[in-house]
Image (cartoon, rainbow, N blue to C red):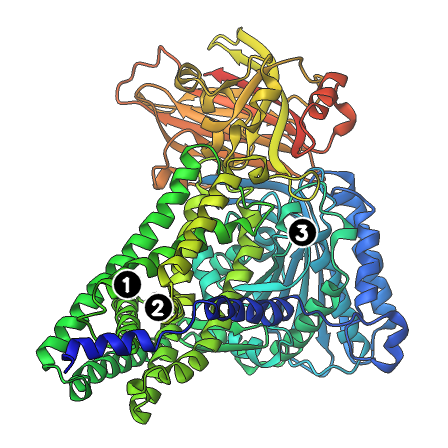
Amino acid sequence: MKSKYENLKIIYNRNKFGWYWAPVFVSFWFVLFYVTVIPCFEYAPEPLLIKDEASNPERFIGERAENNLLNLTKMGPRVVGSAANEQGAVQFFLNEVDKIRESARNDIFEIESDVQIGSGNYILWEMVNMYQSIQNVIVKVSRLDSNKTSCLLLNSHYDSVPESSGAGDAGAMIVILLEVLRVITKNDTPLDHCLLFLFNGAEENPLQGSHNFITNHKWAKDARAVINLDSAGSGGRELLFQSGPDHPWILNYYGKHVVHPFGTTIAEELFQHNFIPSDTDFRIFRDFGKIPGLDMAHVVNGYVYHTKFDKFNLVPRFTYQLTGDNVLELTKALGNAPELDDPSKHAVGHTVFFDFLNWILIYYSESTGMILNICACVAALISIFLYVWLLPKHMGLRRSRTFIHFAIIFGIQLLSVILATGLTIGLGILLDSVGFPLSWYTKNWMLFGLYFCPMFFFLGILPAIYLQKTKEYGIPLGIAVQLFMHAHCLILVLVTIPMICFEIRSAFLLMICILFYTISVVINLATCLHRKTFLWLIAHLLCQIIPFLFYTSNCYSFFKAFIPMQGRDGADTDPELLMSGFIAIMSLLIAGFLVPILFVFRKTKTILSLFALVCVVFIILACTPVGFPYEAKTSPQRYYAVNTLRRFYNSDMTMRREDSGFYIVPVDRKPDSLDEFFLNSNLTKASDEDCATEVVCGFPIYNSRWLGWKNQSFWIPGPSPQPIGIPSMRIISKEAVSATNIKFQIEVSGPDHMGLFFQPLDDAKLVDWSFNKEPIDKQFTPPYFVYFSHGLDPTPLRFIVEFERYSPDWSGPTFDFALIGHLVHHEIHYTDEFREFIKSFPEWAYPTAWTSSYQSWRL
């Protein structure tokens, strides 16, 4: 007679599937991804043509928007201060508004337009962001039969960064707003509230146009909510990545009326915690206007964002129709929303929202989300406990022995999760440390081998070894596999609990995984299928389809949006850490309940080892030319290249030093990619000596992001730019306010983009100035930075700065003052040497170039 354990061994061996079924099992999930997730994301409506308008009088016409974008981008780059931005673009909008007014139902609507020219300053990113005479074009639409003053604000920007025609960022959004304006006013569109269309002339400066409107314009006080449209790519789907805040009613309208939803709370929380290297006007409307709204942006093909490759022909034709349909329906809905009368009455907390395969938007309140998360966790704990409690009944084991088995399995699964996550992230850190980051930047498929495969391998190898070693004395294989999945579910619950406690709304990501697995457990318990060898797999696998589609869809969307962003996140940010960490998390959700299924096939360890082998192959590829990240024009490496003249003055205004050269700012994790191209150029990085003695190391810093990048940037001595547009500085007065205080009145004039830096010396302390007082009140770390730009009016900037010292001894200098001028749209003045230098960059590198000057005085 055979022993009990020998019987168990027979059951174990008899019920394993052949190894050849494993590729079929794995292939099924790959095929499901390719035939469902990708087509859903890439789906696009057929654009309506102008000839279709007669039969679709109230529809958005994509072709007209496309034609408008072509005309707008023909102007070339529209940088603040340039003729294209301050004159050409403004006239373009006035002409288009006149055309719209001619075709509008003027018996129903009143259409007013205004060109706003304004000045102001505020704090952004710990710098004073100051502007003078920048422009906006605003159109107000009101129904004649409505006496309400509350308005819905729709905003996008028409200015662009240097060298870019701004087709994607954000010309496409601008022409979509123009077409929405035309469609609404040409028909008898119900409209309870007025609409404000803000064509913003200074977003890239950054965010000055929206600040000018919301703080200075006569219509700003009527804005009750905002739809902000921007771009981090070149067309495609627009992602809803911010809502509210604290106004869930707005999301209700989005969910009910948007035709092609695409949004997630995850993107909102990532953006608000600075994981996305961008900002939008939504921040200004929220912080200065105190109005809620929706923030949406195109995120596809971010490789060309803020480059000269952001051209009209790269914006997919379906973009206009897809986004236009969404914005038009959303505008109609919010334009009639009763909540717009007084939004403050409806400020009732945050919202959890996410789309499923871009078909539907699921949304609910934060409190509802917390209840769902708690219920899912409690249900999972109860179902797992019941499973383990009832297990001895048909296994012939003591209950205590069963719980010991489960505890051992839980420990192995926990170790597997920790090992898989740690080693996968460690691999990313290793690739970065040995100089091979971003191998997946252009070849996105590299991510599968580098990070998904090691996760799959380490998630399965320890449980497989355990089952192999204990098969003669363990529990039946089907039961053991289920216990491993129970253990994984328990781990997810233990991670979700602190997320609930810290009110992290993205906890829904784990809740969905827990919920669907719990449903399968309940079904199997209720039908007793969990005891029927492998029949429990039917319910389990069916319940995994929806989570698999959801998580792989989120992965695909994340990669589409975030991979290009890693090419502009700075040399001080590790993209491998972000990608490996994200993939580790998603693998636990996608594969945590699928990898254990591989245990039911013969040659389990061999099957799992194939994932490890693939990983090794991909690591080798990452270290070869195959893993080179960049391609010319489509996904180039970004740099800034600034031909700079530098002059350093003593306290007696005599010049102590003058030089010139090329300042190179790498924008991604591979700052040394150009080393071999400039071997004979005396290329140097920021030196400790210069950084100790010169303001911002003597570099022509453009904005505050460059401050964080200066240690990775380069200086190459070279010929001077033409001495054009060099700012001037004069001291109007210098007076002692008291025995310990001294005040300077200074005037500066120069190009339309300048940087002013103030570095107090010795025991001097800045106590007052003409700009925003927040840096003084909050004691920002010097040097104090004022970013200044102007549009039409080049009037010199006058200001005062007052310093205090602990002692009345003013014999030495008080502060260093650096004045930097940037000629960002004056390519005509480039020297031949600078043009040749730009051409010397390899074809896979893209330098955004301009000329500048750096001057510093010890005053």
Q: Give the vertical position of 594 relative to 273 (above or below).
A: below
> Which residue occupies 47% across, 39% down?
127
Query: Where residue 169 is drawn, which disc sits there?
Result: 3
Q: Nearer the viewer, residue 517 or 733?
A: 517
Q: Give the vertical position of 563 relative to 737 (above or below).
A: below
Secondary structure beneath dot 2 equals helix
- Closer to the N terminus: mark 2 or mark 1? 1
Q: Is residue 696 visible?
A: yes
Q: Whole-Å distance between the Cαs marked 3 and 2?
A: 50 Å
Q: Whole-Å distance between the Cαs marked 2 and 1?
A: 8 Å
Q: Where the N terminus falls, by quadrant?
A: bottom left
Q: Nearer the viewer, residue 802 or 593?
A: 593
Category of crowding for the residue at label 2, using alpha-carbon neighbours closer than 10 angstroms: few (below 14), some (14–19), many (at least 20): many
Q: Quadrant of residue 323?
A: bottom right
Category of crowding for the residue at label 1, using alpha-carbon neighbours closer than 10 angstroms: few (below 14), some (14–19), many (at least 20): many
Left or right of 18? Residue 336 is right
Residue 636: x %, y % from top left:
64, 39
Query: Where residue 463 is drawn, which disc sits there?
Result: 1
Residue ranking furthest to the front: 1
Secondary structure beneath dot 3 equals helix
Q: Amino acid at mark 1?
A: Pro
Q: Amino acid at mark 2?
A: Phe
Dots 2, 1 in contact, CB < 8 A: yes
Residue 656: x %, y % from top left:
51, 6
Residue 256: x %, y % from top left:
58, 81
Residue 81: x %, y % from top left:
70, 38
Q: Whole-Å distance between the Cαs marked 1 and 3?
A: 49 Å
Task: Report the residue marked by disc 2.
Answer: 599
Give the number of the mark in front: 1 or 3: 1
Q: Is residue 225 visible?
A: no
